[in-house]
Amino acid sequence: MPDGTLIRTIRDIPGLIAAGLVRAGEGAALEQVAARYAIALTPAVTALIDPSDPADPIAAQYVPHPDERITAPDEHPDPIADLALSPVKGIVHRYPDRVLLKPLLACPVYCRFCFRREQVGPDGGVLSETELAAALAYIAARPAIREVILTGGDPLMLSPRRLRGILAALEAIPHLESLRIHTRVPVAAPSLVTEALVAALATRKALWVAVHVNHARELAAAARAALARLVARGIPLLSQSVLLAGVNDSEAALEALCRALIAARVKPHYLHMLDFAPGTARFRVEVARARALHRSLRGRLPGHAIPTLILDIPGGHGKVPAGESHLARGPDGSWRARDPWGDDHAYPPDRLRAQDASSAPSRRGRG
């Protein structure tokens, strides 16, 4: 582990070399990566990395790799069509009932698998007052929108005053029913989750916070304390995780992650299949293996601790579950149910038995 003397965010290759996180001989190749994609490792993240372990799952998420220079044929700078679905700066409108609001494009850390890696960076500025007003006006003019999701970038990097102002403006839109914030801050920069920031989240609208966590070790003491401050204010917490080769693509790693989330009072929500952003192929997990790993959680964990395996269809066509069904038709057309241990069992057909149908109460005459 680093000796604790590092007190700043690492943002360049010399900093990574000095911290022992990359070898000096890799510097030239990694400078090419750094010229295209932002780098940031906070002290909280750096403290979790074991530099002596070449397969460290925390380092894999944040430390740049030479393979990021390679763009596979099926990778795209905007893999889920955020830009094509952005009618106003800062807004992504993919579903009729909800929109993304991106008030800034900066993050405390820059994940090497990020699907917005072509857009985010330390110079990803905050929306101007004029731009924010236009985004809010777009939402206010469309009563079909019921939820606004603050994302980016990371909304919890905003000052409490700025964040409070945005939430107050959203709170004043009558047709909005709920708000959501997607963030990496409680894990990557837990010191930012101050009492002032948490107080800024107070709103009469239902507010949910979705925390991005991929490995149980990310839920260190400081992260758990930051999450506890949110929980103490009555804010419900969800998780978003990405299934990543070399990070969490094992039964043990996924089980440990889900158990750590539940212990921190975070409901495991989504386990994402990797989006096809440039230079991310080394993180891919094949669909069959992803399904098998997800299926293995059933029987190892209680139901509320199992996230939905989800994929975002490339091209902006939305999210759909990617997991295998536990109920399927057999070759003869009958239903077969698969238990948590992989055994199949007969399941009664859809039609009612004759005696059941004859004894069913009549619904005629009901108003």
Image (cartoon, rainbow, N blue to C red):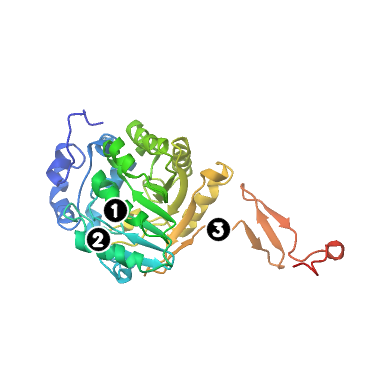
Q: Tell me the kind of residue under disc 1.
A: Ile
- Above or below — where is 142 with respect to 340? below
| Circle 3 SS class | loop
Where does the C terminus fall, quadrant-wise? bottom right
Q: Are marks 1 and 2 in contact (CB under 8 Å)?
A: yes
Q: Nearer the viewer, residue 82 or 231?
A: 231
| Circle 2 SS class | helix
The residue pinned by badge 2 equals 132
Marked residue nearer the N-terminal end (3 or 1)? 1
Marked residue nearer the N-terminal end (1 or 2)? 2
Res. 330 image quadrant: bottom right
Q: Tell me the kind of residue under disc 3.
A: Glu
Q: Tell me the kind of residue under disc 2.
A: Leu
The residue pinned by badge 1 equals 166
Dot 3: few (<14), some (14–19), or many (≥20) neighbours within 10 Å? some
Give the numbered dot on residue 324: 3
